[in-house]
Image (spheres, grey):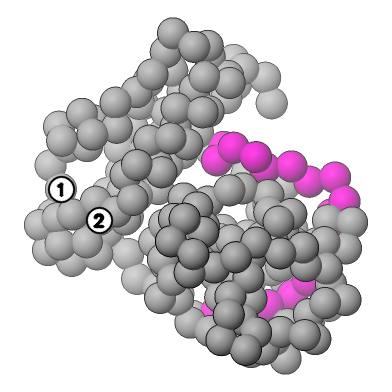
Amino acid sequence: MTKSMSRFIETIRLLDGKFGNLIFHQLRMHRSIQEFYGADLSIDLKEVISSCPVPSYGLYKVKLVYDKRVQEVLVSPYSIKKVKKLKIVYDDSISYSHKFQVRDELNNLFEQRGNCDDIIIARNKFLTDASYANLVFGMSGKWFTPTTYLLNGTMRQQLLAEKIIHEKEITVHDLHRYEKVKLVNAMLQFDGPEIDVSQIVS
């Protein structure tokens, strides 16, 4: 993707009028803009959201579309979708280090899910992410997230900073050592459903 084509999205949790995890969202936006558009550009996230009318009650997803500046802000009600079964799909060349608006590679892999609800992407047999979330694997009351993630999600960063989860290299062959897996992102946080690893198929 060229710099002239690059647009990014930032998805922020809004619960009862309060935005979640703004520090990590701001940092990610700053890194993307600096890398693609230069050191003299920036977006003040707090300034952007303070100018947007938002609901004061309920759970909403606030989606920003931006490049050098914010192009669009979309606010929509959010409900957690059920994920009970995951399929491992393989792509040794996939890259998604920034939260790009264009997600063709991820969407194509998601189409391979069969009768499962979502996917676990394996790159060179190392586990990375689901189609729209980071992964954390539970073992003996402790939670681990792959070092080989595709996108360093804002909730992933927060949970690591708070030492709720820990980084670990996890391959397809390591799955039997774990009991459960969670999908985490800005909207799900750490409250999403726990899925038994027996519900992961290849």
Between 125 and 105, the residue placed more toward the observer is: 125
Residue, disc 1:
54
- Which residue is rendered at x = 68% and y = 77% of the image? 86
* Quarter of the view holding residue 88: bottom right
Amino acid at pointer 1: Val
Whether residue 86 can be seen here? yes
Q: Amino acid at mark 2?
A: Leu
In this rendering, position of residue 186 left or right of residue 137: left
Q: Position of residue 29 (x, y in %)?
A: 44, 32
Quadrant including the C terminus: bottom right
Q: Position of residue 75 (x, y in %)?
A: 27, 49
Region rendered in magenta: 83-100
CB under 8 Å between callouts 2 and 1?
yes
Q: Is residue 90 magenta?
A: yes
Please tell me the numbered disc located at residue 143.
none
Q: Residue at x 71, y 84 (%)?
A: 178
Rendering coords of residue 151 (x, y %): 61, 48
Which residue occupies 78% across, 46% down? 94
Dividing the picture into quadrants, the one containing residue 168 is bottom right
Outermost residue on the left side: it is 56
Q: Which mark is residue 14?
A: 2
Question: Is disc 2 placed on a helix, strand or loop?
Answer: strand
Rounded to the nearest whole Å, what is the CA distance between mark 2 and mark 1?
Answer: 9 Å
* Element on which disc 1 rests: loop
Identified at 82% across, 61% down, the residue is 126
Q: Quadrant of residue 96?
A: top right
